[in-house]
Image: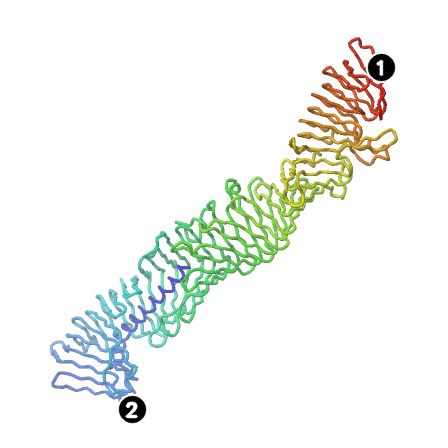
């Protein structure tokens, strides 16, 4: 926090300047009071005499001189009663001999009637403390003058009756550390008030070079203080100003407290050696600082009233609060800043921001809000750490490309946040990381879409060097809720989740689990896109589809997936979408599974390299390859009630449970207990689940009703081989009908038979051949079994 650290240095500069300046001006008037104060009997002695050199006036107390006045020449004018003093020298030792201050000038005049003493030319004043005065002989000067303060004024007028003094012209002062002036001076003995009338200007030299100006200044009595009107402090390219500022002095004229009131404003621009342009400002209604006993180090500070701090440049930052409490080390280094009451720390564009007015949000804005935030400052004066007090919130105007384009935002809340800061660019302070706990919550809000919420015990956010959010990690009982209606809602659970802003992805690890659309899925890793609601799972995928009451509701007329039993899926990878309600499963050599994804209900199973499952419409699309085709097993009962399997394979399977139709395309093969059929495509019609259950010995819901194969049909059955363009198989009648081509059948004993239509049966040797005459021809064929 370079702004606050530089304010500390500014106030130290002010303390030094006014300690010197006030001491000088005050002492210059103090000798007037001393010279005309009424002596205490028995304690104060006054000696007045003329000498060869002119005039001497001594005032002593306790055996030590406290005041001495010398004049080289005294002239009295009878005409007007005035007295002229020339070559005047005044030395003030103080009651405890702790001072050695000298006032001298060439030409003074005194009017006994008015009591005015007027310096007709310049008056020089040298101020020097003499802490060893009591150890030295009376009137002995200090052995060494350490940093004397010199003041100069013209036209000084002092009234011995009232004790008041004034200068209409310029009053100047110089020292090893500072020099300055003011136009006009007024001193009032009653109340011991000293006013610098106008155009106050002080310059501090050396490494702390600065210029202080003010419209007016007043030094008052007990407690002694200097009040400046419209003060402005300029140091290098930095500026500090206010409507008024009061400097309260303690012992030895040391500043103990500084109070600035009204339109307090500090501005810090790019510093020498800093390559990145930056400008920082502080605005408040009041600022108060306590100074330690040395008078040049800050001990504490309090800034109140709509406090607003801005850091402009490559990484803008703005902070606002009702009050700032500042804590300093013994060496005056700022250690901690306590921001209180509606604190807001905003990262984003603030150039030209009006005090108290929020800047317009940019696409990369984010901010921290809390009732109170404690800031720790490093030894270099940079913001190091911020800790919120009480429930806090982080708002990100955008957290990724998709959300950014839609004008969305993400809100992060927790019981407490701890933010760490760094200095990746010269002259700037950037947010590096944020840790929050307990009860962490992240809500992503995109216009036109439901709010997506994730909760956990704790949350950690990392920020890139350019200030943008890089990632957010949630740990401890992570729970994600997509926010859609119950039919489409997606939930996720895990031990740990990591969000990356660039792609809006949340990666779940540590026993992740997805729940949605009557589906539960576990995997090694789960990834969720917070912007779209899509979910991806990888490694040992296991999905189960059930209804809310614990049993799958069969679809009307459902066959393959028409049972009330759960549907299970295993795969190597999974992709779930929210609209439409579709889940894509795929196989692969990942985890414990290799090759195909598997979907089954009771004894009914579909296997393929990829299975697209729409649970809402009970629709399956299974895709395979020539090497690894899609595979399904159906069952058929024989006349004795025994079920026998039929396995079908193909490049693609499309099945909709509502009409009980399975369509196979591309290199289709059907294998039963005693036959094999190959074709370009096959349509398999299944009996509805309710009808299949009428046969109590039949446990599956995928009982084959009819199978139709089309295109380049080849059939092998009980040693017979048949070819044609279309094959219709009806399990209940156990017969095949082959047409097109024309169809033909080959028997080892009978040879080849060809006709327009061939009908033959699974369990006997009958073959029905229909020719052009349309009259049936029956051929008995003996088949060896």
| One can see residue 515 in this view | no
Answer above or below: position of 128 versus 767: below
In percent of width and height, residue 343 lies at 49, 57
Relative to 437, residue 220 above or below: below
Give the residue at x 27% y 63%: 201
* 676 displayed left or right of 300: right
Q: Which residue is outermost to the bottom?
A: 42
Locate the C terminus and report the quarter of the image it occupies: top right
Mark 2 to mark 1 CA distance (whole Å): 161 Å
Circle 2 is placed at which residue position?
Answer: 42
* Residue 278 position (above or below residue 192): above
Where does the image place residue 319, in percent across and percent down from the top left?
45, 55
Q: Residue at x 15, y 75 (%)?
A: 106
Answer with left or right where residue 350 lies relative to residue 37: right
* Mark 1 element type: strand
Residue 642, x across and y down, in percent? 85, 33
Foreground residue, 697 or 651? 651
Q: Position of residue 748 (x, y in %)?
A: 80, 20
């Amino acid at each position: 926090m370079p702004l606050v650290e530089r304010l500390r240095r500014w106030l130290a500069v002010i303390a030094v300047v006014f300690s010197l300046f006030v001491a000088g001006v005050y002492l210059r008037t103090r000798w007037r009071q001393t010279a005309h104060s009424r002596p205490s009997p028995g304690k104060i002695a006054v000696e007045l005499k003329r000498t060869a050199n002119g005039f001497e006036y001594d005032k002593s107390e306790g055996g030590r001189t406290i005041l001495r006045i010398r004049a080289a020449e005294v002239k009295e004018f009878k005409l007007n009663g005035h007295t002229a003093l020339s070559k005047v020298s005044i030395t003030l030792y103080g009651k405890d001999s702790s001072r050695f201050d000298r006032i001298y000038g060439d030409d003074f005049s005194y009017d006994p009637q008015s009591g005015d003493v007027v310096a007709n030319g310049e008056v020089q004043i040298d101020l020097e403390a003499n802490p060893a005065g009591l150890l030295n002989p009376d009137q002995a000067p200090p052995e060494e003058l350490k940093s004397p303060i010199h003041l100069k004024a013209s036209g000084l007028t002092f009234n011995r009756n009232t004790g008041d003094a004034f200068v209409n012209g310029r009053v100047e002062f110089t020292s090893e550390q500072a020099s300055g002036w003011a136009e006009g001076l007024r001193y009032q003995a009653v109340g011991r008030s000293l006013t610098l009338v106008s155009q106050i200007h002080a310059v501090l030299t050396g490494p702390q070079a600065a210029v202080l100006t003010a419209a007016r200044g007043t030094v008052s009595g007990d407690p002694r203080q200097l009040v400046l009107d419209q003060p402005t402090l300029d140091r290098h390219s930095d500026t500090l100003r206010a409507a008024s500022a009061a400097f309260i002095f303690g012992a030895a004229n040391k500043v103990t407290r500084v109070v600035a009131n009204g339109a307090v404003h500090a501005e810090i621009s790019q510093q020498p050696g800093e390559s990145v342009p930056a400008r920082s400002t502080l605005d408040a209604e009041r600022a108060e600082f306590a100074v330690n006993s040395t008078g040049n180090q800050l001990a504490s500070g309090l800034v109140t009233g709509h406090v607003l701090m801005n850091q402009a440049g490559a990484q803008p930052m703005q902070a606002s609060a009702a009050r700032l409490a500042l804590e300093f080390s013994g060496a005056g280094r700022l250690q901690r800043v306590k921001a209180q009451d509606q604190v807001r720390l905003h990262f984003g564009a603030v150039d030209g921001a009006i005090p108290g007015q929020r800047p317009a949000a940019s696409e990369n804005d984010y901010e921290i809000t809390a009732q109170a935030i404690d800031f720790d400052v490093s030894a270099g004066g940079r913001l190091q750490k911020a800790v919120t007090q009480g429930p806090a919130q982080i708002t990100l105007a955008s957290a990724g490309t998709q959300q950014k384009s839609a004008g969305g935002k993400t809100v992060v809340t927790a019981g407490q946040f701890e933010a760490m800061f760094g200095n990746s660019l010269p002259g700037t302070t950037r947010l590096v990381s944020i840790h929050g706990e307990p009860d962490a919550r992240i809500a992503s809000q995109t216009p036109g879409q439901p709010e997506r919420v994730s909760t956990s015990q704790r949350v950690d956010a990392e920020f890139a060097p350019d200030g943008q959010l890089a990632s957010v990690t949630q740990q401890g009982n992570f729970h994600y809720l997509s926010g859609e209606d119950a039919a489409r809602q997606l939930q996720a659970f895990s031990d740990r989740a990591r969000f990356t802003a660039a792609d809006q992805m949340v990666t779940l690890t540590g026993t992740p689990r997805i729940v949605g659309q009557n589906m539960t899925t576990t995997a090694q890793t789960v990834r969720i896109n917070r912007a779209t609601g899509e979910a991806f799972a990888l490694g040992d995928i296991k999905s189960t589809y059930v209804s809310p009451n614990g049993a799958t509701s069969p679809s009307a007329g459902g066959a393959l997936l028409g049972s009330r039993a759960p549907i299970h899926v295993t795969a190597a990878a999974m992709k779930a979408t929210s609209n439409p309600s579709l889940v894509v499963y795929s196989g692969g050599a990942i985890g414990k599974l290799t090759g195909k994804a598997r979907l089954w209900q009771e004894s009914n199973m579909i296997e393929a390299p990829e299975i697209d499952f729409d649970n809402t419409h009970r629709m399956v699309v299974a895709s395979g390859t020539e090497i690894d085709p899609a595979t399904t097993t159906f069952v058929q009962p024989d006349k004795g009630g025994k079920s026998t399997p039929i396995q079908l394979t193909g490049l693609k399977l499309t099945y909709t449970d509502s009409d009980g139709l399975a369509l196979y395309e591309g290199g289709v093969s059907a294998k039963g207990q005693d036959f094999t059929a190959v074709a370009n495509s096959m349509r398999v019609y299944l009996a509805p689940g309710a009808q299949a259950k009428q046969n109590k010995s039949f446990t599956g819901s995928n009982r084959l009703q009819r199978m139709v194969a089309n295109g380049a049909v080849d059939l092998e059955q009980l040693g017979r081989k048949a070819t044609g363009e279309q094959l219709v198989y009806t399990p209940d009648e156990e017969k095949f009908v082959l047409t097109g081509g024309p169809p033909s059948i080959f028997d080892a004993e009978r040879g080849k038979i060809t006709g327009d239509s061939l009908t033959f049966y699974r369990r006997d040797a009958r073959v029905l051949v229909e020719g052009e005459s349309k009259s049936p021809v029956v051929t008995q064929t003996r088949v060896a079994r």
